[in-house]
Image (tube, rainbow, N blue to C red):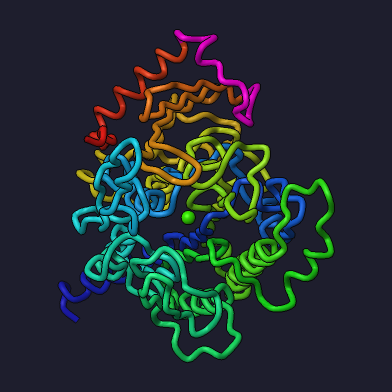
Amino acid sequence: MTRRQWLASLLAASTAQAQQQRPNIVFILADDLGWSDLGCYGADLHETPNLDRFATQSVRFTNACSTGPVCSPTRASIMTGKHPAKLHMTTWLENAEHPATNRKLLPPITKENLPHGEVTIAEVLHDAGYYTAIIGKWHLGNAGFYPETQGFDINIGGTFWGAPPTYFYPYKALQSNGEFRYVPHLENGKPGEYLTDRLTDEALKVIDNAKGRPFFLYLAHHTVHTPIEAKPGMAEKYEKKIKPGMRHKNAKYAAMTQSLDESVGRVLAKLDQLNLAKNTIVIFHSDNGGYIQQNITDNYPLRSGKGSLYEGGVRVPLMIRWPGVTPAGKVSHEPVVSADLYPTMLAMTGLAGDAKHNADVYGKSLAPLLKQPSAQLDRDELFFHYPHYYPTTTPVSAIRTREWKLLEYFEDGHLELYNLKDDPSEKNDLAALMPEKARELRARLNDWRIQTGAQVPTKRI
Ligand SMILES: [Ca+2]
């Protein structure tokens, strides 16, 4: 061996060792899971023993918000750390280029595809030697913009669509609008096979296939999004359990939540079994508040649900287990947002990412809170922007501080002001009583919209 070869082999060995020392990341994202849907967040009907146990091993956030009140905006912010308003991806993809034209305002036309120029967390991790896999829902672009083009080695199931046609194999069906919808790469299933279980099987294979390489497993479950379909025999237990006065009343939804919980239990058990838990960060989160139409769920004590910028639309579960760092079973009450997870993942893996991209990142690293859950971040407010219609809302922006929340509705410009400390259910609008506070917060919100280049709705002619 020449000296040059010897040096090269030494360098390769040390690079491999550095890669091995980097922690794996398992990021489990639930779809439409509401803030109070889990036992450890106060659910009354649902049973989630695995997630409740995970809470005792993690830092659990009580004021975590999704960056958007619907699917795609939050997912874009997780992938890039940027605000959906900055990305011009403020609504779900199927809605992006076809805004409502029969309402008082005309919502902006927004982007369907996450641009290739964005540096996704998968790209950063992939470039650092990680084996990167998405299992489940993508919802960030058409075929030319699928996960394979954004840093993922493996894509099982990720497409343009935001929901499966059915949770049962073969996961394909003709929709009422004539569209044939399917979930790809799940061939060779068995009749009766259930999507949440199958995606978990695929996730476990990723962990096996990593074979010593650091891995990033983004398990983006479709559950508990519609269609509300439970595994046979699982809903009956909840039917019997429902009592008058319970806030959750949907046995099938409860069963779907149980399937999600079982998936988390299987993934955590796999990490234990392969002795990987000590070097694997696990994040559990949801992409927006619970869906309150059709009596599916209830985000009590929070107001409203998916689509809305009241707390029920954006407050979601978030728990993070960072081995050797997070104290077990602690709670952080600091307001945080999904976009924070991008810089958090950089901090946890010790990777710098792309300086130019990072300059436009909205999120802040949660590492200080994961080390010291009673700490506060150096950030005074969070901003939300949804210039679109949904059954729960008209176009709206919001600013929230640790104590205050102001919503500005675009149709008539009216402001609503709530004190979240005294009034977490947002029942008492203080805007008329405290006009100075409302004006101050409105000015900060407006400044942020201008700085961010947020798209706003226009008057219909
Ligand atoms: Ca969603």
Seen at 54% across and 63% down, the residue is 226
Region in magenta: 421-436
Q: Is residue 275 left or right of residue 202?
A: right
Q: Depth check: 221 or 414 in front?
A: 414
Seen at 64% across and 66% down, the residue is 256
Seen at 30% across and 41% down, the residue is 107
Where does the image place residue 29, in percent across and percent down from the top left? Answer: 50, 58
Q: Is residue 325 left or right of residue 23?
A: right
Where does the image place residue 213, in percent across and percent down from the top left? Answer: 40, 72
Q: Depth check: 265 or 125 in front?
A: 265
Q: Which quadrant does the C terminus fall into?
A: top left
Where does the image place residue 244, in percent across and percent down from the top left? Answer: 83, 50
Seen at 36% across and 75% down, the residue is 178
- Asked whether 432 falls inside the magenta stretch, the response is yes
Q: Is residue 165 left or right of residue 81?
A: right
- Asked whether 234 falls inside the magenta stretch, the response is no
Residue 456, above or below 175: above
Residue 316, above or below 175: above
